[in-house]
Amino acid sequence: MYTLGIDVGSSSVKVSLLNLEDGSCAASAFYPSEEMPITAVKTGWAEQEPEQWWNNMTLALKEVLARAAVPKEQIKAIGISYQMHGLVALDKEGQVLRPSIIWCDSRAVEIGDKAFEDLGAEYCLSNCLNSPGNFTASKLKWVKDNEPDRFARIHKIMLPGDYIAYRLSGEMQTTVSGLTEGIMWDFKKDSLAGELFDYYGFAKELIPEIVDTFSVQAQVSARMAEELGLPAGIPVSYRAGDQPNNAFSLNVLEPGEVAATAGTSGVVYGVNDTLARDEQSRVNTFAHVNHSPAQKRLGVLLCINGTGILNSWLRKNVASNLDYVQMNEEAMKAPVGAEGLLVYPFGNGAERVLGNANPGAAFKGMSFNIHNQSHLLRAAQEGIAHSFRYGVDVMGEMGIKTEVVRAGKANMFLSPLFRQTVANVLNARIELYETDGALGAARGAALGAGIYQSPSEAFERLTCLQTIAPDKDQAAVNASYQLWKDKLQF
């Protein structure tokens, strides 16, 4: 038996087929080969067309099915992971009304800040565990204020993964976990955040049917099954935002467990069992995939928007003669601390950890007589690791410990320099695993469909590939971090 995992990112859409007998990946593909475009009509804006996600998903799925060549009847369920916080607005006919305002769009910062002031910190932080900030609810308010005719035609709003599930099944649905990432859920009342909805002037009817994260949520329609080459009626049995799903894919489900990613954005995600909050909303708390009113499991999320996108920018503009492996090798030619060159990776929209400031990326301390390409590449990787440390210290104030951090051996964690720097600056052991968001979604689908009976069964064959502990350079890395922190401005 097999399950499919779909991971809708902002750079590409990946589809993987999981062999449930041995836990291996039977086939995997992603589209497009280059990064999906992000439209920025104005500074700070970021939009993508949902149709773009769907088209790339169908291409990746077609390739996976061709590569695996398994009888379609053996594919038993579908799970979906998706880029968080994106706003998809549909009319009564199910047509998309406007491009999706995605996670790194910062147009709604002032709207969220005003809501936080007017509603009060006590309500926002005690009930929603976050400031409304630049999240989905505030983005919807922007549409209401600036595109009233379009807003009036909205029948339901969705997150990106909800939209893919809708296209597969025809069912408009979402989850509690998804609603919390939009700051639309009241944890104290275990219901939609009524006061916030009233303040923003939203009808609760805009929210589609709420389904459990692990459950038979919908079935692939007969028309889509024929079009995509899937079994008719195959269940969609799991959906989650990319960071909760990444944590799930690494078997991070219980209090004290921590996961990390470093793709376009970078995330450290720890599980808590109390309704903790950061008074400044520099890190955010959402319902984890296994959260319930009876058993609270909250994901405390640190997000650094400018992570892999900084590395990508450097490759295009500074190191176009190198591939990523060569960039890593070149970076290691420079000493720890890059001889005082500091890089601040905050060039991809408003950064929550900086109080929603948008200072832009910065290079400080550069000397034309000392620094070269190697220094710049190393300082960039160190700057990303330092930004992780800056946010992890905030998480520590909420009771999240980072003694062990699990990560997939992918993206920037492929860099020996980056993962060693992270281990040193966090004073943590880094455990690397061969998994990703699409495979995590496929495991979630099997669990939601009842094929796996428990998480322990789902992750029985997930093994640690490599462990990185702090090394002899830790003191030098910490000194570099202190200098980086002292000169941080926003």
Image (tube, rainbow, N blue to C red):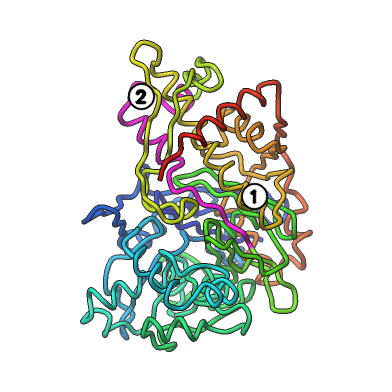
Few, some or many residues within 10 Å of mark 1 (<14, 14–19, 20+): many
Left or right, 13 with respect to 278, comes to left
Left or right, 110 with respect to 468, comes to left
Left or right, 140 with respect to 307, comes to left
**Residue 424 occupies quadrant:** top right
User: What is the span of residues highlighted in magenta in the rendered image?
Assistant: 299-327
Residue 197: within the magenta? no
Query: Could you tell me which quadrant the N terminus lies in?
Result: bottom right
Work out whether 377 lies above or below 43.
above
Of 46 and 457, nearer the camera is 46
Q: Residue furthest top?
A: 369
Residue 418: give its label. Answer: none
Asked which secondary structure carries label 1, the reply is strand
Rendering coords of residue 328 (x, y %): 50, 24
Residue 300: within the magenta? yes
**Mark 2 = which residue?**
319
Rendering coords of residue 394 (x, y %): 60, 51
Residue 259: give its label. Answer: 1
Identify the amino acid type marked 1: Ala
